Image (tube, rainbow, N blue to C red):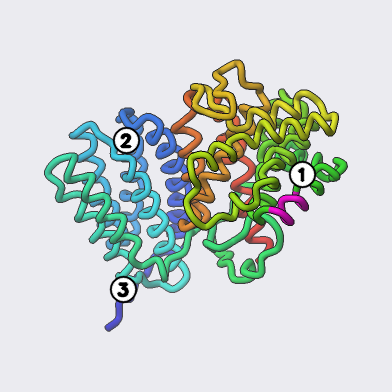
Amino acid sequence: MSFEFPVNVDQEFLHQFREELQWTNQELEMLAIDLERHPENMQNVEKLRLIIHESWMNSVKLELTPLSESLSDTLMALDLLLDWQVYPLRMTEFLLSMVDRLMLIAHEVEEHQFIDMRKTQAILVALQYIILAQNSQQFSHGIEDAIIAINQDLNVIHETVFTDDDIVLFGDDESASQIDTKGPEIFVPNVSLNPLEQARDFIKNQSNKDCVMMLSTISDNATQYHQSHTQFVLELALMVNFIAKQVVDPVSIYRGICLHDIALATHPELLNKKTKLSASEINELKQHPLHGSKIVQELSYSDETELLVLHHHEHLDGSGYPFGLQKDNISEQGKLAAIVDSFHEAMEKNAHLSLKKQILRGLYDIHQHAGRFYDPTWAKLFSDALREYWVPDLANRFRQAS
């Protein structure tokens, strides 16, 4: 039995529609981030509806009936949310998954002039769980079922921006040759004005003895994760600081990030332990910023470097460690390091998801806790840096590697 629904669509209009879906996807991501932080802001739900409505109108003009039906049911779901004045946070995951699949379907139509009805059926079945809800509680349960339904065909669906779920972020990756490079072009900012390139140039021009010592120690005595973690966090921290006009001395960021987890190398038995850590073991690991700062002192590095190592797990509300410092008692380098460090940890916790969703979950974590754990000014700069420079660069490198 064939599941291919033949279509005959003007290629120019279809290509334009695909570009509009790409824009829709980006707008949804930004609105979703704000909604996860302020789910009571129904104006953003209304904006979501307007964006989806525009895509629905264009799909009708193109006579892409399966896509039109999916978008129409999505509008019904958003109408329910507006009627009930609620926004369940899991709705974000569903909306982004749905638009990803619509973009894939549009790409399929452009390439092969048919729609695989199994993909559109997965969306419609998922939406039925939501739009048949009689109240907000049923709606929330419906979303859980919808997410399961829309993800049932993951074995045949790939992300449309980050097209390989297993791509490593640093180093060469043999799987890069398997990446599907077909997709919308992504804007890459002018290199001369790009803080990400400034960060990379700065790293290249530094003496690497600090990172070599830290990375080799961690690699030999602890886990490989901390080696890639340090490389990842270092680039992000320097990029954000360049956007902030170097509020923090970049040399202290370089040395501080390279050494921020150096004390963990003294506890390889805890880092590699397969069973659950005891309370005392957890408390011992929480002392690593303090022990690490003492190592920095012994190396006779600057106070700014020492403060980054000492404060990178402190939170504005006093819930961090090792001292439970609050607000202005935390150094600026500590506030910045806390954000980039936590972002990577949030991504790692969601390693079972696609790379694109890992990044989104990391961003959600920062936005949800901005003002509570993380400095809101640094959080805003970080979000801008990721959206404008880091994510476009990442996607562009994947395409070039293939």
Cα gap from disc 2 to disc 3, whole angstroms:
33 Å
**From the viewer's perspective, is residue 160 above or below residue 369?**
below
Residue type pointed to by label 1: Arg
Image quadrant of residue 291?
Answer: top right
Relative placement, left or right, of 393 versus 127 is right
**From the viewer's perspective, is residue 98 above or below residue 3?**
above
**From the viewer's perspective, is residue 402 above or below residue 235?**
below
Mark 2 or 3: in front is 2
Q: Which of marks 1 and 3 is nearer the N terminus?
A: 3
Element under disc 3: strand
Residue type pointed to by label 2: Val
Asked if labels 3 and 1 touch by Cβ distance under 8 angstroms, the answer is no
Mark linked to residue 45: 2
Q: Give the range drawn in magenta.
A: 215-221
Residue drawn at 71 percent across, 23 percent down:
247
Mark linked to residue 200: 1
In the image, residue 16 lies at what x, y percent?
47, 54
Mark 2 or 1: in front is 1
Q: How crowded is mark 1: few (under 14 residues within 10 Å), some or many (20 or more)?
A: some
Asked if labels 3 and 2 touch by Cβ distance under 8 angstroms, the answer is no
Mark linked to residue 5: 3
Image quadrant of residue 301?
Answer: top right
Mark linked to residue 387: none
Residue drawn at 29 percent across, 64 percent down:
122
In the image, residue 342 lies at what x, y percent?
56, 39
Q: How crowded is mark 3: few (under 14 residues within 10 Å), some or many (20 or more)?
A: few
